[in-house]
Amino acid sequence: MSKSTESAVRLLILLAIGTMAGAAAFTHVHDLSVAHGQPDWIGWANAVAVELMAIYLGLEIRARRGAGRPVGLVGSLLVAFALLSLAAQVAEAEPSVWGWTVAAVPSLAFLALVKVVLSNAPVAPPVDEPDQPTAYQYEEPATVEPVRPAEPMPSIAPAVVPPRAVVPSNRPHVVGIIR
């Protein structure tokens, strides 16, 4: 099988699983919303919000990984929306272990699909972004050891230093936090 044929087959499988899992998940969230007093259109709005948010977050994780940006918050949100979808599916199931397991299949298939697709994302080198504002960043000065002369210096007569008021000091005055 050629690479292009294999890629086409993989894409078709991905679309089939995604479509079926999405349809089941949309229906479960809609039905649960309506069963608990929401009007029909709000049931569909809830289904769209929960399911498409999970898909969007999966795509956002892929984009952030490609750019070398952190994905912690987005990953947590993806798990939260996937669990919300899973809870809606299980709540609509027959109250038995097999009923809950079969009802959970669409959400679990979707999560597995997202994981597989995202694991194929190319990883870019991390972008060098500062963790703190530049006003608070500073570089440590390099330590310089004093150079000792090889010969002793000849004695020099002490210089006459003018009074302080006459010659301004060349030392900057430090105001604020001293490092």
Image (spheres, rainbow, N blue to C red):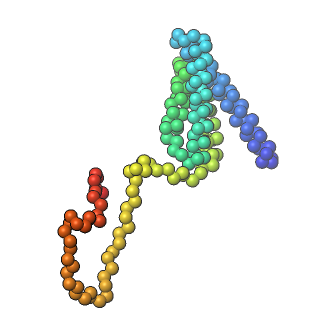
Viewer-proximal residue among 100 and 106: 106
- Visible in this render: residue 104? no
- Relative to 135, 106 lies left or right: right
- The residue lying at 31 percent from left, 88 percent from top is 150
- Relative to 161, 72 lies left or right: right
Viewer-proximal residue among 46 and 171: 171
- Visible in this render: residue 178? yes
- Relative to 178, 40 lies left or right: right
Question: What is the x, y in percent for residue 41?
Answer: 61, 13
Give the image quarter of residue 156: bottom left
Question: What is the x, y in percent for residue 133?
Answer: 42, 47
Give the image quarter of residue 147: bottom left
Q: Decide: is 137 above or below 112.
A: below
- The residue lying at 57 percent from left, 10 percent from top is 39
Q: Decide: is 69 above or below 87.
A: below
Q: Decide: is 165 above or below 93.
A: below
- The residue lying at 58 percent from left, 29 percent from top is 53
Q: Decide: is 92 above or below 150.
A: above
Quarter of the image with the C terminus is bottom left
